[in-house]
Structures are given as structure tokens and as C-alpha cells.
Image (tube, rainbow, N blue to C red):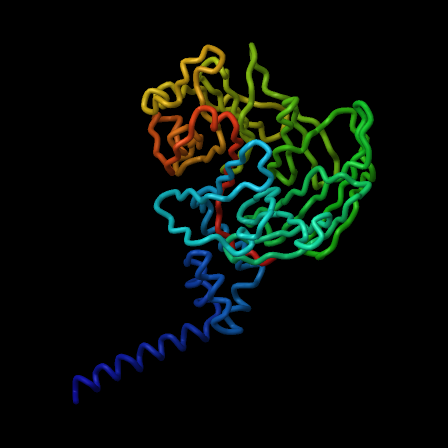
Amino acid sequence: MASRGGRKGSNIRASSSAAEVGKSEDLLNEIIVRLPAKPILRFKLVSKQWYSIISTQKFTVTYAKRNPKPHLGFLLHARLNFQPYPPTLFLSLGGYQYGKHPNFLEIPKLEIHHVCNGLLCCSKPHVHAPEITSYYVCNHSSGQSKWLRVLGSPCIERVKAFNLAFDPLKSPHYRLIFVSELSSLDECHLIKIDIYSSETESWRPSKKGIYILQYDIGFHIAVYWKDAIYWYNQKNQSLAYFNFDDDSMESLPKPQVSGTMTYYYFGESGGHLHLVGACRPWTTLFTVFEMKEDRSGWFVKYNGDFGALAAAFPKMVTNKPNRPYVFSLVNLLRGEKEEELIIVLTIPEGVIGYNVQDKTFEKLCNLSLSERKMQQMTFKAHQYIEVVASI
């Protein structure tokens, strides 16, 4: 009897402690904010009190600040030439257990336009009216999605870009820009930009009206950095950006280099903007450039060589004089140490994470691709981050 009574007393004390925690929102907030994002998002269903705590703007920013380097893996898209909607493959970092894709990633003909700090914007044609396209923003962690606008075809506006601006360290709110080309004649392009704010839940036209551009921005690769959207045009290797402060659109200089260099990666990591160039197809040498904080130009962050990687994976070597090596740079990630850089690249044998400082590497997944198939494919990898933001 004494033993049962002891256990009963212990259970009463535990229940009392749990009740005290439940009464203190500050203490409950301190406990919940230390958990991974996916359980936190499920805990919204526990009670109205928990939902209220987790849904606040303060909690979203606090969670992001407590998890400043939450890169858990990559979403890899491997697109064959003329393949409109490539499948999505998840590559884990550090043993992270991803689970299954959220339901929206399984939607047929879904096209992902941009991924930014855990949120993504995408579009899909209507099942019974493929000439009509709907545009959405989604939270990958929660699986939540939100419809934003719809466009029909034929349309006088040609959609050029649908991009996302989100920094959970500064605000729980996000913005989207929708870029349309009204007309194009020779080197003159008439561009219209609409901006969506999740804070006001409304669209507005750019304060600059119609942009008359004397060059083709391309809008091929989009990156959010320092309150602006940056675009890299793969065709003519030009750079431009849209500044949210004043809705201005400006061009950016390319790195000053001697000789010929082709740029294969453009992106942001660890609060820095990077451009990776390589002297391909003739060598394995590459250079990592970093943009100056004032946008005035680039400086060399690191010079490296994939030669050791080619020695470890001989299928990278083709023995063809016009293209002696075959690989594709898909992402760059700043490591746990301040100066550590990890380059993610695809090779015939798989996807590799290569540490440019100590020249070590890790195979993130296995592939078996022929040289010809590698040349027919375009690879793109988005950094996967868990966030608790509501959309």
C-alpha cells in the first residue's frame, strides 16, 4: 500500500508541475521554442492556448533566432531536356530524418519557382482547364499552402518571374513579386512588377510603374539577399536586382577576372551572396566570389580545384579534349565554422558535398548516370529549412 501511495503521490506532483507549466505562458513558450519545427506545428492542435502562443509574430522570430543555421538538407530537381515538371528528391544533411513530401509537392505538373528560407512559391495548371494557371505560396515544414492569384491564357502579360522574399530572423511576414513582360522589341523590354505583402494580405503595383529595360534580365535564377531580389541571366551572364526599399531595378557588375570564366552557381548562404565560376570545360579549377556588403563589387572568397574529387570518382573524367570532366554545381552552403564552405555538385556516381577548405567530401546520394545523360540534364538544389511561419 505504501508503494502504491508513493507512486500516487509522485503522479500528483507531476500533474501539479504540468499544470503550473500550463498556467505560465512564458515558461511554456521557453519549452516549445526549443523543439524542432515540425512537432511545434503539430502542437498547434493541442489547445487554443498552444495555438495562440505558436501563432504569434514574436514566437516566429524568436524561433528563427534560436535556430540560426537550420539547414537540414536539399531539395534536388533533376530535369531532362524538355522535361517540364521534374520530380523532387530530398538529400539529407547530418542524418536528418525527412519523412515524406508534403502533399502539395505530390501535385502533378507542379512547378517550383523559388525557395526562400523555408517557404516556396509555385504554380500549377488547372486539371480541367490547363490554359489557366494558379500561383501559390507554401510552407514546406507544415505542408500549408495559400492561393494567391490566377492567370489565364492567352494573356497580354508574359510571366517572367514569381519570387519570394522572406527572412524569419527579421519578420514573420513575407513578400512576393510577380514580374510580367508586356512587350519586347529588339533590345527594349517593357516590364511590370506587382508586389504582395503577407502583412496586409494584398497586392500593389510597383511605385515605379512600367520599367523600360534596354537589356534582357532573363530572370533565370532568383536569390533574396539584403531586402532585394537578385537575378542571374544564364544566357548572357548578366546580374540585376529589385530593391524593395524604393522599388528600383538596377544592374550589378560581374566579377573582374582575367581570361574567360563561366559562372555555374549563384545563391545566398549564411547571409552572403555568392557566385561560383569555373574555367570549364578545360579544367577542374573554380573560384568562389562573394558580393561586398554595399553591392559595389565582388571579391575572391576562395580558389579551389576539383582534381582530387575527379581522382576519387573516375567517371567524372571523359578523356574528351573538348569536355574532359563532367559535373554540375548545384549549391553552396556555409558550414558550421565561419570560413567553412560546402559545394554541392552532381557527378555520374551521385551527389557530393565537397568541403573546399580541407578538400574532404561526402556522398549525399547515389546516382548512376552516363556521360550523355549528365549532359542532357539540368540540376537544381534548394536548401531545406524548417520554419514555423504561418502563411
Q: Residue furthest bottom?
A: 1
Is 43 or 187 nearer to us in this picture? 187
**Is residue 238 visible to the viewer in this orientation of the structure?**
yes
Determine whether 65 is above or below 333 in the image: below
Q: Where is residue 15 in the image (x, y as percent from the top left)?
A: 35, 79
Which quadrant of the figure contains the C terminus? bottom right
Q: Which residue is pictured at 59% across the width and 31% down the height?
A: 293
Relative placement, left or right, of 117 versus 182 is left
**Left or right, 247 with reference to 139:** right
Residue appearing at x 51%, y 33% in the figure: 379
Q: Is residue 123 above or below residue 357?
A: below
Asked if residue 246 can be seen in this view, the reply is: no
Residue drawn at x 44%, y 24% as measured from the top left: 371
* Residue 337 x/y as whole percent: 39, 35
Which quadrant of the figure has residue 111?
Answer: top right
Find residue 55 and report its horizontal and vertical position in percent. Answer: 56, 63
Farthest residue in the left direction? 2
Relative to the observer, which residue lies in front, 93 or 374?
A: 374
In the rendered image, which quarter is residue 147 located in? Answer: bottom right
Quadrant, the N terminus? bottom left
Total labels drawn: 0
In the picture, residue 325 is in which quadrant? top left
Image coords of residue 181 (percent x, y):
77, 36
